[in-house]
Image: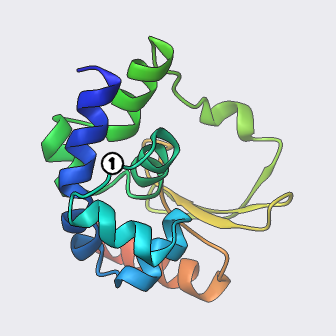
């Protein structure tokens, strides 16, 4: 797949991704960084999104089933390969200097980033599964994940 085909494919999926995420046109345009008018034009397939908008969509809605099924995998991975010729995967172990582990239970870890002040939950494979600026939200998520684990 080349860049043009990628952009055209994303144009046809924009509205589906938005509705899948439960976003209004106002909230989606704000999240992606577009005017509502531009978003409407993309959704009606009157204009193509630019490359930056496509990357924003893939990064911010990376877990979208619509995008995953459309591209048979991680949309951001495909975008990196199209753009750079290869994909770079984050090395989470190198981030240890920034993250403080607040709590560990049932293989899950609740962490806080001292620099950017976000919280995240890591699963038993040391992969981030949820992040938030709101401590109460992340603790609720952490506790639910721990409760779901077999004893």
- Give the answer, above or below, for where 58 lies relative to 35: above
Decide which of 140, 63 is in the foreground and name it: 63
Characterize the local packing of mark 1: few (<14), some (14-19) or many (20 or more) Cα atoms within 10 angstroms: many
- Looking at the image, which residue sits at the far front? 46
Q: Residue at 26% x, 51% y: name it.
A: 11
The answer to whether any part of residue 4 appears in the image is yes
Q: Residue at 41% x, 46% y: name it.
A: 54
Q: Residue 121's spot in the image, x, y percent?
A: 54, 62
Q: Quadrant of residue 148?
A: bottom left
The answer to whether any part of residue 74 appears in the image is no
- Give the answer, above or below, for where 51 lies relative to 105: above
Decide which of 7, 106 is in the foreground and name it: 7
* SS class, disc 1: loop
Q: In the picture, which quadrant includes the C terminus?
A: bottom left
Q: Residue at 50% x, 43% y: name it.
A: 126
Q: Residue at label 1?
A: 48
Q: How many marks?
A: 1
Decide which of 14, 124 is in the foreground and name it: 14
Q: Residue 15's spot in the image, x, y percent?
A: 23, 67
In the rendered view, does 138 fall on the left or right side of 146?
Answer: right
- Looking at the image, which residue sits at the far bottom? 136
Q: Tell me which colouring the rendered structure shows.
A: rainbow
- Give the answer, above or below, for where 111 lies relative to 128: below
- Give the answer, above or below, for where 30 lies relative to 99: below
Q: Residue 112's spot in the image, x, y percent?
A: 73, 64
Q: Residue at 83% x, 42% y: name it.
A: 97
Q: In the picture, which quadrant includes the N terminus?
A: top left
Q: Residue 45's spot in the image, x, y percent?
A: 21, 57
In the rendered view, does 39 fall on the left or right side of 99?
Answer: left
């Amino acid at each position: 797949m080349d860049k043009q085909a990628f952009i055209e494919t994303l144009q046809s999926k924009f509205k589906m991704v938005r509705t899948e995420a439960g976003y209004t046109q106002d909230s989606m345009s704000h999240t992606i960084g577009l005017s509502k008018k531009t978003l409407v034009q993309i959704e009606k397939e009157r204009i193509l999104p630019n490359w930056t908008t496509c990357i924003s969509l893939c990064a911010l809605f990376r877990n979208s089933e619509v995008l995953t099924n459309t591209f048979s995998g991680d949309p951001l991975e495909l975008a990196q390969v199209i753009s750079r010729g290869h994909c770079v995967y984050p090395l989470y172990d190198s981030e240890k200097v920034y993250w403080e582990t607040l709590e560990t239970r049932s293989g899950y870890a609740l962490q806080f980033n001292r620099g950017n002040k976000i919280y995240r939950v890591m699963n038993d494979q040391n992969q981030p599964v949820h992040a938030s600026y709101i401590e109460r939200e992340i603790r609720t998520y952490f506790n639910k994940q721990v409760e779901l684990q077999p004893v």
